[in-house]
Amino acid sequence: MNKSAIRCAAIQYPSGLIFSLPAPNRHHNLIWMMAELGIATPITGTQGFLDATGNFITREAAAILVDSDHKKLYSEDLW
């Protein structure tokens, strides 16, 4: 598993805006942050990651990138 290919957990909001926090934060930390910023709950958006170059990738794409045995990658798989 190439964990270095993933930089951090991220959520892409429907507007295209991407929220992220540095590792070892997880998606629930992002959801709490977004709620604290005043984004209406429940938080919607696509959960994924930022890759080593800063591009947003889905959980499915991240699993392929790190050569995981799972169909979706979770931050718990990384840190």
Image (spheres, rainbow, N blue to C red):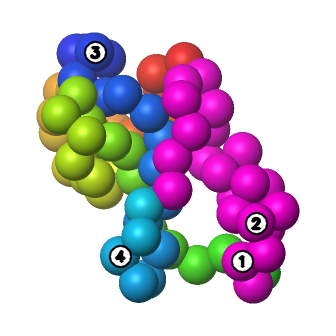
Q: Is residue 9 visible?
A: yes
Label 1 residue SS: loop
Q: How many marks?
A: 4
Query: Reading the chain from its start, which is encountered first: label 3 or label 2?
Result: 3
Q: Are marks 4 and 1 in contact (CB under 8 Å)?
A: no
Quadrant the N terminus occupies = top left
CB under 8 Å between discs 2 and 4: no
Q: Are marks 3 and 1 in contact (CB under 8 Å)?
A: no
- Vertical relation: 16 (above or below) 10: below
Q: Secondary structure at mark 4?
A: loop
- Residue hosting label 4: 16
Front residue of 5 and 22? 22
The residue shown at (78%, 56%) is: 32
The amino acid beneath tag 2 is Leu
| Rendered image: mark on residue 37 | 2
Instruction: Specify start and end residues of the magenta stretch as a single range.
Output: 19-40
What type is the residue that disc 1 sits on? Ile
Residue at which label 3 appears:
4
Residue 50 lies left or right of residue 46; in this view the side is: left
Q: Which residue is mark 1?
A: 39
Pointer 2 or 4: first along the chain: 4
Q: CA distance from mark 1 to mark 2?
A: 6 Å
Q: Residues within 10 Å of mark 2 (few under 14, many from 20)?
A: few
In the foreground, 74 or 12: 12
Q: Residue at x 31, y 28 (%)?
A: 6
